[in-house]
Image (spheres, grey):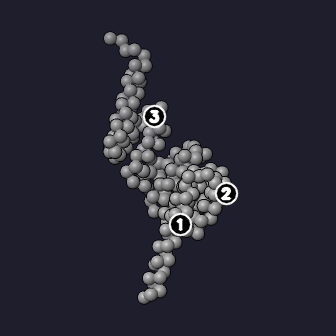
Amino acid sequence: MIPIPGENSVKIENIYTEYYNIAEAYVNLAKYEQAVKYYKLAMGSKKLYWTCMYKCGRAYALNENWDMAVSYYEKLLKRDPDNLDLKLSLCYITAMNSDVKQASHLYEKLYQEYPDNDAVLVNYINVELYFENVQRAEELLKALKEKFSDNANIKTFESKIQQINEKNDTELQAEDST
């Protein structure tokens, strides 16, 4: 039997597509380590390479393997340095990796680059509140109120700031009484 021209490359591409589909099924089952294995296999396809690169980074993040997630998102950002979603993801991953200074620095840089993006500002405030940097969170909240007065997060942020301040006051009172 005479082989059909290009048939072998189609078969190979179909195998890579199957690897990708298996990886997606593992993600849906929250089996992220298994998903990464199959995404990496699917990366043999030039067509799927960058999609799988992103999916690997995402799977690492979902599995809370922050260091690996960071490395993948940094590679993606080198390829697409203006991608806001990738930048936000990298900021989030850095924060979840408990690198407080770096996360704050990345959000500050992102906020300077996108001062009129409410998602950037909201995420930045969330990180500052998570690490209980109340003073900076209050400054950012003021900017949020000025620029996006109808943002649904304003009341939540005000409440969180109040809770943190009350907790800090209680701790100070406890220290003073000893």
Relative placement, left or right, of 41 versus 168 is left
Count of numbered circles on the image: 3
Disc 1 on helix, strand or loop?
A: helix
Could you say where residue 99 lies in the image, as x and y percent from the top left?
Answer: 48, 63
Q: Closer to the observer: label 3 or label 2?
A: 2
Q: Quadrant of the N terminus?
A: top left
Residue under pointer 1 = 161
Disc 3 on helix, strand or loop?
A: loop
Q: Residue at x 44, y 33 (%)?
A: 45
What amino acid is labelled 2 in the image?
A: Glu
User: In the rendered image, which quarter is residue 139 located in?
Assistant: bottom right
Could you say where residue 55 lies in the image, as x and y percent from the top left?
Answer: 44, 42
Confirm whether residue 94 shows in the render. Answer: yes
Dot 2 or dot 1, earlier in sequence = 2
Which one is in front, 126 or 67?
A: 126
Residue under pointer 2 = 146
Relative placement, left or right, of 67 versus 152 is left
Residue under pointer 3 = 48
The Cα–Cα distance between marks 3 and 2, rounded to whole angstroms, is: 43 Å
Q: Is residue 172 above or below residue 139?
A: below
Q: Is residue 3 above or below residue 24?
A: above
Q: Residue at x 52, y 63 (%)?
A: 159
Could you say where residue 117 lies in the image, as x and y percent from the top left?
Answer: 62, 50
Q: Residue at x 46, y 78 (%)?
A: 171
What amino acid is labelled 3 in the image?
A: Leu
User: In the rendered image, which quarter is residue 39 located in?
Assistant: top left
Dot 3 or dot 1, earlier in sequence = 3
